[in-house]
């Protein structure tokens, strides 16, 4: 500080405060890089993550944990190579150390290892592939949503509780789809009478409908997030299967947007998730009210995860004074999970993935006759994932 500036600041206590306040006001915001899917059939997933994350920033007065932040957002278009290029630009050109936002596991597997190799920090609001949860876990990698298998394990347990004995299971042929079928099979105690991998970009499921009919299962489990899930449910109803073969699905296959698109044919669908918009805790109520007021559209699980991710990062930044240059200090703060999650109980396991509760839900009519997703009962309490035991952190 110059002699003139020192003299000016020393004239009076009030002036001194103003000088310090001016310095604080000039603080550069912490840049957070968000790589997410904003276009194509799965575009609304990334849009909800982005909007809910930004809502948390807005509710904090442009800050997370008292730290001013600038969220840089770019669309990976569900292309792993494009996601990798965006992350590279964030880190090398924009000097971003903290990244988030990825929806799909194939994009995550292209991006996250590069982030970690460059001493960056990645906090996932959605994708949680098994390959990064066990032996390949990393001190700078955190998942706030779930490990991929675990939400499908909850669907398997839901199927057991509902008394189903023969299941036909389907998912897209990419890492999250493989994790989905493995997770369901790990928990389901009945017989698998058919197992099919679909294409990630598939929208015509006529062949799969014929296979389901021929296999004569008493339940279908399917994981198809975004537009593919909407197409699958519509075709399931058109094939006349909805009346004869019940369906058990994880939250990505039946969210509020999918329900709005499908409507009445979804009635009776059995869903499992770690959060729903009817949760009766203060954090969830505040989030639902704020999101509805701000965006006036259905709230998905993806939005809740984007919001929780922002809160988790904010709690860590509060403890580190807004610093991310010391990754170990950030990690120590992050692992405390010192925030109120919209889902209720939340903590990190040894592999820095969630330990949380899972609930059964069902699509039913509300008082006005409209289909809604209603929480029915808890399926699993305080559970982590099957890969944590292999993580040596």
Image: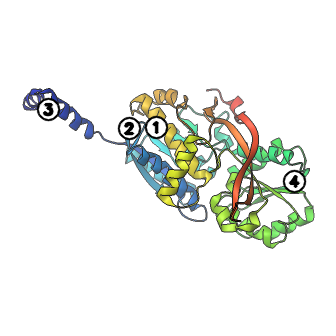
The earlier-in-sequence mark between 1 and 2 is: 2
Identity of the residue drawn at 49% across and 51% down: 290
Q: How many marks?
A: 4
Q: Earlier in the sequence, mark 3 or mark 2?
A: 3
Q: Is residue 327 left or right of residue 186?
A: left
Please name the residue that numbered disc 1 is placed on. 314
Along the line of sight, the residue nearer the viewer: 361 or 115: 361
Measure the C-alpha gap from mark 1 to mark 2.
8 Å
Q: Position of residue 47 (x, y in %)?
A: 52, 58
Which numbered disc, 1 or 4, marks the residue closer to the eye? 1
Element marked by disc 3 = helix
For label 2, the residue is 67
**Is there CB contact under 8 Å for labels 4 and 2?**
no
Between 37 and 85, the residue placed more toward the observer is 37
Pointer 3 or 1: first along the chain: 3
Q: In the picture, which quadrant includes the C terminus?
A: top right
Mark 4 / mark 2, whichever is N-terminal: 2
Q: Residue 116: x, y in percent?
A: 52, 38
Q: Is residue 148 left or right of residue 112?
A: right
Task: Report the front residue among 196 and 143.
Answer: 143
Compute the Cα span from label 3 to label 1.
Answer: 32 Å
| Disc 3: CA contacts within 10 A as few (<14), some (14-19) or many (>=20) | few
Q: Position of residue 101 (x, y in %)?
A: 52, 49
Q: Which residue is mark 4?
A: 167
How packed mark 1 is, by other alpha carbons closer than 10 Å (few <14, some 14-19, many 20 or more), is many
């Amino acid at each position: 500080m110059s002699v003139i500036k020192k003299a000016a600041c020393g004239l009076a206590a009030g002036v001194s405060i103003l000088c310090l306040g001016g310095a604080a006001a000039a603080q550069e915001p912490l840049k957070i890089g968000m790589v997410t899917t904003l276009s194509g059939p799965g575009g609304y997933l990334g849009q909800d993550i982005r909007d809910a994350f930004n809502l948390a920033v807005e509710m904090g007065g442009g800050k997370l944990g008292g730290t001013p932040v600038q969220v840089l957002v770019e669309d990976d278009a569900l292309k792993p190579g494009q996601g990798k290029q965006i992350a590279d630009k964030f880190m090398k050109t924009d000097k971003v150390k903290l990244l988030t936002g990825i929806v799909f596991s194939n994009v995550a597997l292209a991006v996250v290892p590069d982030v970690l190799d460059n001493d960056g920090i990645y906090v996932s609001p959605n994708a949680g592939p098994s390959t990064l949860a066990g032996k390949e876990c990393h001190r700078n990698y955190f998942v706030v949503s779930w490990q991929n298998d675990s939400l499908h394990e909850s669907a398997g347990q839901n199927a057991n509780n509902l008394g189903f004995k023969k299941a036909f299971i389907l998912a897209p042929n990419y890492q999250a789809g493989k994790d989905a079928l493995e997770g369901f099979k790990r928990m389901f105690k009945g017989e698998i009478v058919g197992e099919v991998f679909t294409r990630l970009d598939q929208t015509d499921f006529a062949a799969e409908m014929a296979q389901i009919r021929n296999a004569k299962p008493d339940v279908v489990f399917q994981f198809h997030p975004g537009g593919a899930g909407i197409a699958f449910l519509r075709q399931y109803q058109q094939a006349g299967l909805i009346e004869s073969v019940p369906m058990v699905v994880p939250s990505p296959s039946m969210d509020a947007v999918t329900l709005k698109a499908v409507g009445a044919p979804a009635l009776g669908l059995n869903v499992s998730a770690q959060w729903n918009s009817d949760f009766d805790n203060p954090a969830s109520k505040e989030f639902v009210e704020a999101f509805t007021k701000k965006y006036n559209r259905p709230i998905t699980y993806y939005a809740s995860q984007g919001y929780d991710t922002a809160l988790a990062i904010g709690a860590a930044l509060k403890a580190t004074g807004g610093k991310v240059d010391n990754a170990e200090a950030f990690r120590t703060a992050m692992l405390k999970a010192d925030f109120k999650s919209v889902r209720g109980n939340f903590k990190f396991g040894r592999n820095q993935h969630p330990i949380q509760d899972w609930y059964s839900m069902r699509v039913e009519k509300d008082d006005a006759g409209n289909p809604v997703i209603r929480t029915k009962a808890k399926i699993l309490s305080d559970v982590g994932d099957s890969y944590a035991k292999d993580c040596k952190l």
